[in-house]
Image (tube, rainbow, N blue to C red):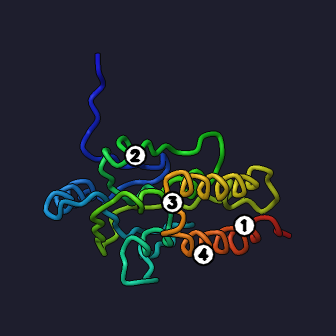
Amino acid sequence: MKRQLGEYVIFIDSDDYLEENMLETMYNIANQNNSDLVICDYYEIENNHTIIKKALKKFDNNIEINYMLSNASPWNKLIKTSIFKENNIRFLENYIYEDLATMPILAGYVKNITYIEEPLYNYIIREGSTMRQKSYNKKLESIFVAVEHLENEFKKRNLYSKYKDELEYIYIEHLLYAASRAFFIL
């Protein structure tokens, strides 16, 4: 029996939750705009303190580049399933930073991105999670595997020359800034 996939896929972290209208809103907008990818803003919740986070930073007039250089997490995105299937895009397994190693690749294949400037996802920050630990954790070294995998995928898919500058920014942002905070915890 052949398994049938849905038209769109969304990823939800087990400790997070959606606004009641998230799926309907994103699906309707995807259909109206013939979108391959729909992104929404989100609430970041930590210790009962909630702030609204913009999902796309404005780096360029090109929404694909803004997408690549913004939050790589898949949980605030509705993605056409065919993008993954037809382009053999798979998440890096057995490593953390799997989102960073995978989600930017979509920029090379999506034709239409729609951005909803409304928080529809609730991202819960838990004290002591792998990414928020107060002591060194060897798992954090996965960042090196993730960026190497990302670069190799861009080269293999003939996307490297088109997005070389964006990949350089990702390296700087994640290797020099974000990872250094995790590795140099006092």
Residue at image point 82% right, 58% down: 136
Disc 3 residue crowd, few under 14, some 14–19, many 20+, Cα 10 Å: some
Q: Which residue is mark 2?
A: 87
Real-space Cα separation, disc 2 to disc 3, in angstroms: 31 Å
Q: Residue beneath label 3, please? A: 124
Q: Which residue is mark 1?
A: 179
For marks 2 and 1, give the one nearer the viewer. Answer: 2
Q: Quadrant of the C terminus?
A: bottom right
Say which residue appears at 64% left-offset and 50% top-offset. 96
State which tag comes first along the sequence, 1 or 4: 4
- From the image, state whether disc 4 or disc 3 is nearer to you: 4
Q: Which residue is mark 4?
A: 169
Label 1 crowd (10 A; few <14 / some 14-19 / many >=20): some
Tell me whether circle 1 and circle 4 mark residues in contact (CB < 8 Å).
Answer: no
- Cα separation, mark 4 vs mark 3, equals 27 Å
Give, as a three-letter code, the residue at label 2.
Asn
Which sits earlier in the primary sequence, circle 4 or circle 3?
3
